[in-house]
Amino acid sequence: MIITRRSAVFGIGVGMGGLIALPRNAVAAPALASTGLPPTPMEMMGPFYPLRRLAEDDADLAHLAGHSKAAKGQLIEVYGRVVRPDGSPVAGATVSLWQANAAGRYMHPSDRNPAPLDPDFQGFGQLRTGRGGDYRFVSVKPGQYPTPQGLVRTPHLHFEVTGAQYRLVTQMYFPGEPLNDSDFLRSTLLARQFDPATVTAARADSHVDGALGYRWDIVLLEPA
């Protein structure tokens, strides 16, 4: 498939390419009934969404066809469900994941980080949710990395989730990371009326040998 960069950018932050402003209409999620699940926050897409056709874009980013070695770093399994605020599943949603490798380098020509690329790492994956809204990716834990402005980003995964009538760009964080509280995006969530817990995965069982397991449910404002 052809991977094209979307024109809309959400959130506030400094990507590797410079300052990105927060649109006025993206400051906070629409109000929900007190019994509803809080929606997963919109965030910036960032400068490293892949632009070109990829040889592989399946849900296993750590293993490439024809390669005898797995990607470097700690193997992880990330899974969960895409649901509506009422808890009902969003079946058939397209979920895309892209991230830095274990050294903190993106597989993108605009990333000027001097950290090494990993020829055994896919860097991007995509799938459709099942009938229960379930998704599952295998990858490696990304490294932290510096921005040109002198900031350091905590390890995170980028997600894009597209339902029939709603699209979400967001980021997932790992629990217990030392840089979580100083990361320029995660640390501003409360000021933007979001709960950091909604974008922080929980440790969970892994179904992959040698992998750390993380569960993260995504709440999409998709009409029923």
Image: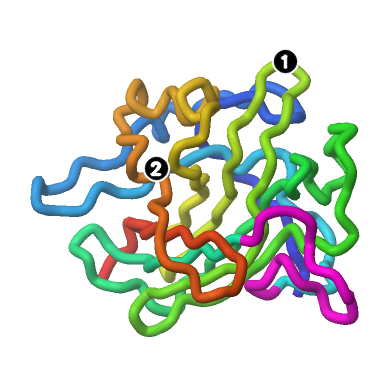
**Quick check: is 103 in the magenta stretch?**
no
Check disc 1 and report the residue beneath it.
150
Q: Position of residue 213 (x, y in %)?
A: 49, 62
Mark linked to residue 41: 2
The stretch of residues the image draws in magenta is 58-75
**Front-lying residue, 34 or 22:** 34
Q: Sort mark 2 into few (<14), some (14-19) or many (20+) by Cα contacts within 10 Å.
A: many
**Front-lying residue, 125 or 1:** 125
Report helix, strand or loop for mark 1: loop
**Quick check: is 71 in the magenta stretch?**
yes
Mark linked to residue 74: none
Visual colour scheme: rainbow
Magenta segment's dominant SS is loop
Q: Position of residue 185 (x, y in %)?
A: 51, 28
Residue found 52% across the figure and 28% down from its top: 178
Name the kind of residue labelled 1 in the image: Gly
